[in-house]
Image (tube, rainbow, N blue to C red):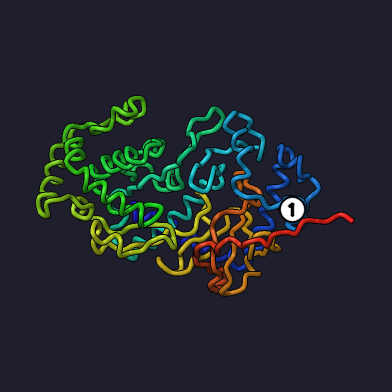
């Protein structure tokens, strides 16, 4: 009870500060950008782009081109090798690997992310009391084709692997996200989650939640046996070194295994909604949930949206309704492109109903990175610019260029 009360109390302070920021969001972003350029003028990126000569956002926009997020790969590879001053003077606290790419995370982003998580969680708790009473389980996102080994900086897999929530509330250890095989990763996440009383389940999309429910149903006997024996199940031999670390602290739990057996006997199969009778809500990224697809595994449990993300950086938060438009909450400087190559716009310049590509500059050292995220401007409320996630428009086809004939 005290944890839920502390979350609500801190959320009120966060919301008050956000409302003050929303009233003049562009000025707040300009102030942050000036400080960031001044502090990082002697980083390799700052020296190459003459940060010391820049004193405003227009100077920054003229001097730094918009790049695709994938083009920052050279800088992140340097961070992995231990070259810490490539993007910022202070080394990032971690490198978060997701489907969008590799995003360096600064301590500032970690703190702000925790504040925004508390604000979002307080809204969910108010709407569905008891959501924060138990554990929070995260379906870990994979990072296909990307190694999680690094000498220079800690690497985490998946946007939700960054621990916004208190670690003691998490049912699935963060190490599970480092497993590259998708089936083994989901199996181990299910094994740890089923052993706890989960009240909030999060994933990147509804499709991942549905796949997670199907895996629990298909592998229920092995999962229950692993909980009864205090082991990691039949797949543990595939990565013995990692699984040895995950085994630390595990104990046999026959009582929990019997409860899961009884839940499976009722319908002849184990559904997540039966394994976790206290489950209050499912959380997915905004705009990423066909709700009907979750019924066979989660019944009528409500689906709430977590916001709009670029990698692990949250750029919009659904504080004005758990399934409505999101208010922009910039991690640094956020710009918008009506189409690739267009003149970048700021929050106050968005035209309601139009769609835009999100371009971010973050404390960790992403500079004008064009993400794969597209949003639609949905108006303004209380000084906050509201957006809704949309699918990216189809690529524009270029007309063939006629060959130049020399005279």
Residue 19 screen position, x and y as percent = 54, 66
Where does residue 263 sit, x and y in percent of width and height?
Answer: 13, 50
- Reply above or below: 299 against 138: below
Q: Residue at x 33, y 57 (%)?
A: 282
Secondary structure under tag 1 reads helix
Where residue 129 sits, quadrant-wise, is: bottom left
Left or right placement of residue 16 versus residue 71 in this view: left
Q: Nearer the viewer, residue 31 or 81?
A: 81
Left or right of residue 196, residue 158 in this image = right
Q: What is the tally of numbered marks visible in this picture?
A: 1
Q: Does residue 305 appear left or right of residue 153 in this picture?
A: left
Name the residue located 69 percent from the left edge and 58 percent from the top edge: 30
Judge left or right: residue 65 versus residue 221: right
What residue lies at 57% left-to-right and 68% top-to-bottom? 355
Q: Position of residue 238 (x, y in %)?
A: 32, 29
| Residue on which the image places disc 1 | 60
The image quadrant where one finds the N terminus is bottom left
**Visible residue check, residue 363:** yes
- In depth, the one of 161 and 142 nearer the eye is 142
Examine the rendered structure and indicate whether residue 254 appears above or below residue 388: above
Quarter of the view holding residue 141: top left
């Amino acid at each position: 009870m005290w944890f839920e009360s502390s979350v609500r109390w801190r959320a009120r302070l966060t919301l008050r500060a956000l409302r003050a920021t929303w009233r003049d969001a562009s000025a707040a972003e300009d102030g942050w950008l000036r400080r960031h350029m001044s502090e990082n003028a002697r980083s390799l990126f700052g020296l190459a782009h003459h940060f010391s000569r820049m004193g405003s956002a227009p100077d920054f926009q003229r001097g730094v081109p918009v790049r695709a997020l994938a083009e920052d790969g050279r800088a992140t590879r340097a961070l992995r090798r231990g070259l810490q001053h490539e993007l910022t003077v202070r080394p990032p606290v971690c490198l978060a690997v997701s489907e969008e790419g590799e995003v360096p995370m600064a301590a500032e982003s970690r703190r702000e992310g925790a504040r925004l998580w508390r604000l979002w969680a307080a809204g969910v708790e108010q709407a569905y009391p008891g959501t924060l009473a138990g554990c929070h389980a995260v379906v870990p996102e994979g990072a296909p084709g990307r190694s999680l080994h690094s000498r220079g900086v800690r690497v985490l897999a998946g946007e939700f692997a960054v621990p916004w929530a208190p670690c003691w509330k998490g049912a699935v250890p963060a190490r599970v996200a480092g497993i590259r095989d998708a089936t083994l990763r989901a199996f181990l996440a299910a094994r740890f989650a089923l052993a706890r009383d989960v009240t909030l389940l999060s994933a990147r999309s509804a499709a991942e939640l549905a796949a997670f429910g199907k895996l629990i149903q298909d592998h229920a006997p092995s999962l229950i046996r692993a909980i009864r024996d205090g082991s990691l199940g039949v797949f543990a031999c595939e990565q013995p070194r990692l699984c040895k670390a995950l085994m630390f602290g595990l104990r046999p739990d026959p009582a929990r295994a019997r409860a899961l057996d009884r839940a499976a006997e009722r319908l002849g199969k184990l559904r997540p909604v039966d394994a976790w009778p206290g489950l209050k809500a499912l959380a997915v990224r905004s705009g990423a949930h066909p709700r009907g697809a979750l019924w066979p595994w989660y019944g009528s449990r409500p689906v709430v949206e977590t916001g709009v993300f670029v990698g692990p950086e949250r750029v919009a938060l659904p504080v004005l309704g758990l399934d409505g438009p999101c208010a922009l909450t910039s991690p640094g400087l956020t710009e918008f492109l009506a189409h690739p190559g267009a003149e970048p716009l700021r929050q106050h310049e968005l035209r309601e109903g139009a769609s835009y590509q999100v371009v971010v500059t973050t404390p960790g050292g992403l500079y004008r990175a064009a993400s794969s995220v597209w949003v639609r401007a949905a108006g303004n409320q209380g000084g906050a610019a509201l957006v809704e996630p949309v699918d990216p428009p189809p690529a524009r086809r270029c007309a063939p260029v006629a060959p130049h004939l020399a005279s």
